[in-house]
Image (tube, rainbow, N blue to C red):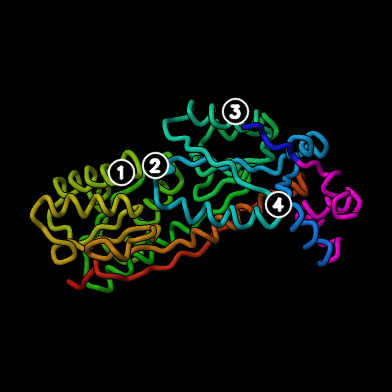
Amino acid sequence: MPQKKRTTLRELAESIGVHSSTVSRVMNPETRHLISHEVVEQVLKAARQQNFSPNRIAATLRTKRSRIIGVVLPDIANPVFPPILRGIEDELAKKGFIPLIANAEGGKERQRFVIDQMAGRQVDGLILATAGRKDPILEHCLEEGLPVVIVNRSEGSGRASCVVSDNRLAMLLAVTHLVELGHTSIAHVAGPSDLSTGYERRLGFLDAIKAQGLKKAPSQVVESKAYSREEGRAACDALLERQSGITAIVAANDLLALGCYDAIRARGLRCPEDISVVGHNDMPLMDSVAPPMTTVHIPLYEMGVRAATLMLDSLEDSTASKINIVLRPELVVRESTIAR
């Protein structure tokens, strides 16, 4: 079957009796407001009927902008990321940009490969959810001249804007909740310390224990190797082997907390009757697990929106100061924590 001939911008303009520059302005969300509503509706209707779409390759060559933002994730299967991505996509769409999303699970070499591929496709900037505390990948991005915004995690150099949640406040909320329920033997399944989320939440937990007047013990914190349910179970098993009498566990994220559920159940214990568990992030469906999880809610959608806004701002003014946005978490109490 012969391929249908593509309608050009000039042909579309001639078919409705307007100048080609008018069509060009209508097809660009940033300049559409310059054209009257009636003409905009006329052009868009004709574009749909004639199966017209702008030639983005030509536009990229002309404007030096692809209107594509690369978004690099550490684990695309992690339920934390869809709300963040939705926020990024919705905000970018307001300015006529779209995200190009890639999974970079597998270490720094994989991340560098993904970023090089995106750079080769002329992305205008990168939103990274993969940053470590001391991250050579950020250095590589900056050497390539790519605008970078970091989301969900932070990187210690301050060379890129970032959007994060207040990890220390989150731990204080969780520990205070458990203390108010009468718990005094509280442990922590920590995230990997090479990530800001794992490092800061661990420090926040220890600070909260001290603030509540509880004794700190070296055995009350076990670091997981990754943010996964499997590693959460392994860390919780190690924790319960090391220390007896634990009545509550604060996990560094919800996947780790689900692993704690598994470890507790495998020992013939019950959550929350024997051990209360608090998660972190409030991933989708945490209200539907058994028991529904008490967790620290992070405004994930807003996090995505703010990251996209920072990226768009940096494209407008590359000399602007780097900004660190810290969003406030909230504790959501469900059924995985009870009074002692």
Q: Disc 3 residue type?
A: Asp
Q: Disc 1 residue type?
A: Glu
Image quadrant occupied by the C terminus: bottom left
Q: Disc 4 residue type?
A: Gly
Tell me the CA gap for discs 1 and 3.
Answer: 32 Å
Out of 309 and 176, give the one closest to the viewer: 309
Q: Quick check: 10 left or right of 154?
A: right
Residue 100: within the magenta?
A: no
Main secondary-structure element of the magenta-colored stretch: helix
Q: Which residue is located at x 49 percent, y 42 percent?
A: 73
Out of 278 and 173, give the one closest to the viewer: 278
Extent of the magenta region? 7-36
Tell me the CA gap for discs 2 and 3.
Answer: 27 Å
Q: Quick check: 308 left or right of 171?
A: right
Tell me the CA gap for discs 2 and 4.
Answer: 38 Å
Whole-percent x and y of residue 260? 23, 52
Q: Secondary structure at mark 2?
A: loop
Residue position for label 3: 116
**Looking at the image, which residue sits at the far left?**
268
Whole-percent x and y of residue 209? 32, 61
Residue position for label 1: 223
Circles 2, 4 touching at the beta carbon (< 8 Å): no
Residue position for label 4: 96
Q: Which residue is located at x 34 percent, y 61 percent?
A: 285
Circles 1, 2 touching at the beta carbon (< 8 Å): yes
Residue position for label 2: 193
Tell me the CA gap for discs 3 and 4.
Answer: 24 Å
Q: Earlier in the sequence, mark 1 or mark 2?
A: 2
Circles 2, 3 touching at the beta carbon (< 8 Å): no
